[in-house]
Structures are given as C-alpha cells and as structure tokens.
Amino acid sequence: MPGRFDPSHYGERMEMAPPQIGRALVVVVDDRVSHGEREDAIGPLVTELLEEARLVVDAVVVVPGDPVAIRNALNTAVIGGVDLVVTVGGTGVSPRDVTADATAGVLDRPIPGIAEAIRASGLAAGAMDAGLSRGLVGVSGSTLVVNLAPSRAAVRDGMATLTPLVAHVIQELSGLD
C-alpha cells in the first residue's frame, strides 16, 4: 500500500537536494540562431552552469542582435520576476554587437566591479572575447543582469567568476538580508 511506513527503512538518512537560490533566464543574442540558420550551442551550456549554481532556469530565449529585441527580452524577464538574467553574445566591438548598449538602457544601478572581474578573469584564462567584451553587469528592479561574451571559454570562465557572487546579490536584492 503506497504511503505506508516501512520499518526496514527506519533510521536511513534521506538525501535532500540543496535549496534553490533563485530563478534565472538566459538570453542568447545571435542573428543566425534567431533566424534558424544555426542551432543554439551556448544556451544549454549556460543553463547547465546555472543549474549547477542552484538556480532554476525558466527559459532560454534567443533574439537577434537588435537593441529593441534585447531590451524587450530583458524587460520581460525583470517584469516576470526572475532573480538573474544572463545574456550571451553581442558584447564585442562590431557594429552588430549592441547587447551592452541595450542593457545600459534597462539597468537601474550598474555593478562595474563584477563586469571588470569577468573581463579580467576571462582574459587571464585566454578567452579573448571575454577580455574585449563591453558587457555590463547591474541591477534592474530586483533582477541581476549579466552580459557574457559568447565563446564557450568566456561563458565557463564568466560563470565561474559570477557564481560565488550570485547568491549574495540575490539575497541583498530580496531585502531579506
């Protein structure tokens, strides 16, 4: 009979999963992926790293390198109440790299120290696109917004730099500190 007490398991320790620290959304900024010309290879990596950091990933959204599309994705995430938005792509110096510009219009308070740490760490790890990134980090409403460069190395290194800080920032933003 389901739900009945089984004395043979008495005294066994139940394994509990660590508590989730918040909700996240991934925004992949890539013209070719958004037009169906290429499959998204970076969204699943970011999702995996966020889940390892104990965040629940609501979705991966793919948008073209268009400031309005990027801003709309960010605003939707903030209004939707996610704790963290990670954008990937569009952070370089080419004319189509407009993620930082679109993000700047959404942020209430920039956190330049985290952005600089991500750049410095990425460059030290050999991820040139991370070192050259114009990516921003800041707060919009009660949501932490982070721009990462799109290479796998930049994402892995950026997440390794960001992960230890995320729980603290989310806690401070929630006002439960």
Image: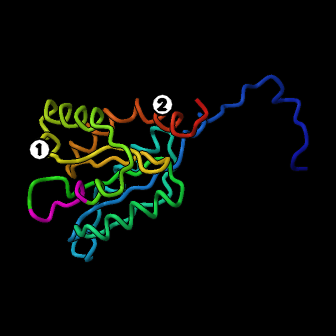
The correct choice, above or below, for 73 with respect to 151 in the image is below
Mark-to-mark CA distance, 1 and 2:
27 Å
The correct choice, above or below, for 33 with respect to 105 in the image is below
Q: Is residue 70 left or right of residue 37?
A: right
Circle 1 residues within 10 Å: few <14, some 14–19, many ≥20 = some
**Residue 102 on image: x %, y %:** 27, 60
Circle 2 residues within 10 Å: few <14, some 14–19, many ≥20 = few
**Residue 33 on image: x %, y %:** 25, 69
| Residue 3 part of the magenta-drawn span | no
Q: Which mark is residue 51?
A: none
- For label 1, the residue is 132
Which of the two labelled residues, at mark 1 and mark 2, occupies the earlier sequence position?
A: 1
The correct choice, above or below, for 71 with respect to 159 in the image is below
- For label 2, the residue is 168
Q: In which quarter of the image is the C terminus?
A: top right
Q: What residue type is labelled 2?
A: His
Range covered by the magenta-colored residues: 95-101
Q: What residue type is labelled 1?
A: Leu
Q: Which residue is located at x 31 percent, y 65 percent?
A: 70
Farthest top residue in view: 11
| Helix, strand or loop at mark 1 | loop
**Residue 23 on image: x %, y %:** 52, 49
Q: Which residue is located at x 40 percent, y 31 percent?
A: 165
| Residue 99 part of the magenta-drawn span | yes
- Foreground pick, 28 / 52: 28
- Foreground pick, 35 / 140: 140
**Residue 26 on image: x %, y %:** 39, 56
